[in-house]
Image: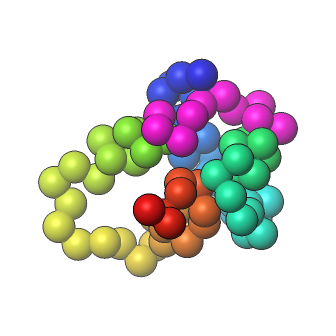
Amino acid sequence: MSKESAEQFLEDALHYPEMREKFTEVETPEEFLQIARQLGYDFSTSELEAVAHEHSQGVTMRRHTGIWPWLRSIKWIDRSG
């Protein structure tokens, strides 16, 4: 697992909407990671969260374009607690 793989995942998700579509029905973080692994990526949710946080440092307004709305809408982390 690696942050580099998470970084590549976000880069690819930005450029390939068809890739993002594979995650639309995800219900759990485990499902999210399983699909990501099937696509050739190997990272943990904490690594993906760390990379996303690094890319959003200093951001005061959320963008409504790109992959950020998609990333906020899917269940890649457990938000129940």
Residue 5 at least partly seen: yes
Q: Is residue 42 magenta?
A: yes
Q: Is residue 2 left or right of residue 15?
A: left
- In the image, residue 12 sits, relative to residue 72, either above or below, namely above
Where in the figure is residue 31, as x and y percent of width and height?
75, 51
Q: Is residue 20 left or right of residue 43?
A: right
Specify the farthest residue to the bottom. 64
- Residue drawn at x 31%, y 72% is 62
- Residue drawn at x 48%, y 27% is 3
Range of magenta residues: 37-47
- Residue drawn at x 60%, y 62% is 75
- In the image, residue 81 sits, relative to residue 15, either above or below, namely below
Q: Quadrant of residue 34?
A: top right
- Residue drawn at x 33%, y 47% is 53
Image quadrant containing the C terminus:
bottom left
- In the image, residue 58 sits, relative to residue 62, either above or below, namely above
Image quadrant containing the N terminus:
top right
Q: How is the image coloured?
A: rainbow
Specify the farthest residue to the top. 1
Where in the figure is residue 6, as x and y percent of width and height?
54, 35
Q: Is residue 72 left or right of residue 33?
A: left
Q: Quadrant of residue 54?
A: top left
**Closer-to-camera residue (65/45):** 45
Q: Is residue 66 magenta?
A: no
